[in-house]
Amino acid sequence: MSTIRGARERARIEVTAAIKDEARKQLAADGAAKLSLRAVARELGMVSSALYRYFPSRDELLTALIVDAYDAVGEAAETAHRASCDVPPVPAAHLARWIAVACAVREWALAHPHEYALIYGSPVPGYTAPQATVGPASRIGFVFIGIVEDAHRTDGLAVPPLAAELRPEAERMAADFAPDLPPAVVPALVAAWSQLIGLISFEIFGQFNRVVEAREAFFRQAVADLARNVGLLDDRADRTATRSAGA
Amino acid sequence: MSTIRGARERARIEVTAAIKDEARKQLAADGAAKLSLRAVARELGMVSSALYRYFPSRDELLTALIVDAYDAVGEAAETAHRASCDVPPVPAAHLARWIAVACAVREWALAHPHEYALIYGSPVPGYTAPQATVGPASRIGFVFIGIVEDAHRTDGLAVPPLAAELRPEAERMAADFAPDLPPAVVPALVAAWSQLIGLISFEIFGQFNRVVEAREAFFRQAVADLARNVGLLDDRADRTATRSAGA
DNA sequence: CAAAAGCAAGAGCAGTGCTCTCTTTGTTGG
DNA sequence: CCAACAAAGAGAGCACTGCTCTTGCTTTTG
């Protein structure tokens, strides 16, 4: 499949890529709100109407960028995961892998704030995300699922307690996404995922200004706590809470 | 202060309010991206240039709406907190208060998704939030700080362990926002705050579509775990993790 | 080789944010 | 009390946007 049949088709994919590249450039410079089809066309030396041969509307261009962004961050997560699996001399512990992947996502977000805003900020085009985005969007999730499955298979997990009313939902979610995992950890995992994005979003969107200064250290601590919530075991033994004063 | 000096000043505050009301209406209908000064003016029966007597630019109108939204969600949180403090026959436990406030924030978000997106989605106008927003933005935070301080004063807290590298930052944050709290809980509290918003954002922005169905139950469980992370004590005794299989 | 399909160019429409000028209308000092 | 002043609305206009339509040109295809 995907054999290029002639000069026309070759030109088409090149122009399509050029449009997306230029759009990404403007996105990084001014944000999604100021991305203009006419400006993209102008910069590429073509007239604005010609651009509609490639993308039927501005929103379609944006969703193409969204899909690419999901793929890029998913790629970053998968790469970090692979790297954390073969560190000499021994493979990293599961907690360390979890932290490594989370840090990779954060670093991608710091490097591409506007693309990050495109996928995890307010949805700009309409209300519901187009169907085309759900595949790439879930790549990240499966990386974390993989880590926890791995931990479950080898070291075991500290399965968190589960409210009775949430049990059927947990079993449905487990059947859908992680059949090998104890149902109780799946909601915790999904929650941890959204909470990880919450942490990153607050940093990217400036909510931590004048609040958190040591961003990296703060993030690592929070992410480790997240992993503990999911049930990943800590190799260190001293992670017991101390009781504070009280009346 | 704030005495109305004449018909002119009275008209001014009325028109200003009318503009914001109409803008909020359009915001709720079509989202921030499609909010148009001209449409607001048209709906109010005035010409667009007249509107610039009240707001010097579209962005200024938006930041006014942002401030109002922060205030509204802060108000919702404070109201829920007060209500949870005097439920008969005994005042609710601190964990229950935490959950009540979190649920109030979530419900406000569900009722006003576009206003929520305005404050916790991608920042639309520029990069940095205007100084005017930081006050109203922190109202919510102080509600949660208050709950934890209260718990510390009466029942005590399960102070979470703190990485050594984060200790100076924790002490600085504690000195700035919660001098009465053990420094170790302050980063956990800030993290929990951002993670709470992460949970709500995922639901509002559709990231939980086809993933989480029982949204309310899922949210309550996640928020209770968040509270436990911060150190709030659970009155129930059965919250110990069970160890899963392993190899 | 001719028909068909893909593509670029240009004009044009409706809408936007924002800036001018001009007139009207409240407020206020002499 | 009335003239000087400042605030407010009206309207025209500029530069820009997304998008559509028609008109030629070029590549592909039967």
Image (cartoon, coloured by chain):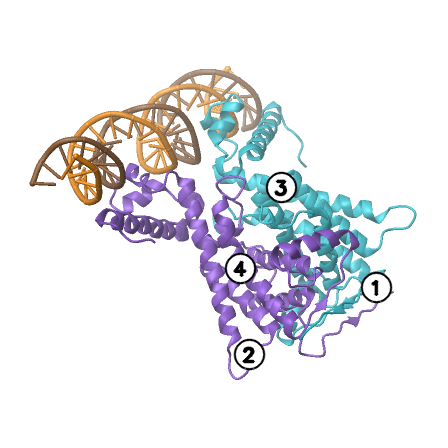
Chain colours: A cyan, B purple, C orange, D brown
Residue found at the far right of this picture: A89
Graded by Cα atoms within 10 Å as few (under 14), some (14 to 19) or many (20 or more), the crowding at tag 1 reads few
Classify the position of the C terminus of chain B by image quarter. Answer: bottom right
Amino acid under label 4? Ile
Q: Which residue is mark 1?
A: A238
Q: Amino acid at mark 2?
A: Pro
Q: Amino acid at mark 1?
A: Asp
Whether labels 1 and 2 belong to a single chain: the reply is no
In the image, what residue type sits under mark 3? Answer: Ala
Residues at marks 4 and 2, common chain?
Answer: yes
Among numbered discs 1 and 3, the one appearing first in the sequence: 3
Secondary element under disc 1, as helix, strand or loop, is: loop
- Can residue A175 be seen here? The reply is no
Quarter occupied by residue B47: top left
Residue B236, given in percent of the width and then of the height, sits at: 68, 79
Position of residue A19 measured from the top left corner of the image (x, y, whole percent): 56, 30
Please state the chain letter of the residue tagged with numbered disc 3 in the rendered image. A
Residue A69 visible in the current orientation: yes
The part of the image, by quadrant, that contains residue D2 is top left
Tag 1 subunit: A
Q: Secondary structure at mark 2?
A: loop
Please indicate whether residue B163 sits to the left or right of residue B61 in the image: right
- Depth check: give the residue in front, A41 or B180: B180
CA separation in Å, label 3 and label 4: 32 Å
Pointer 1 with pointer 4, Cβ within 8 A: no
Tell me the CA gap for discs 1 and 3.
39 Å
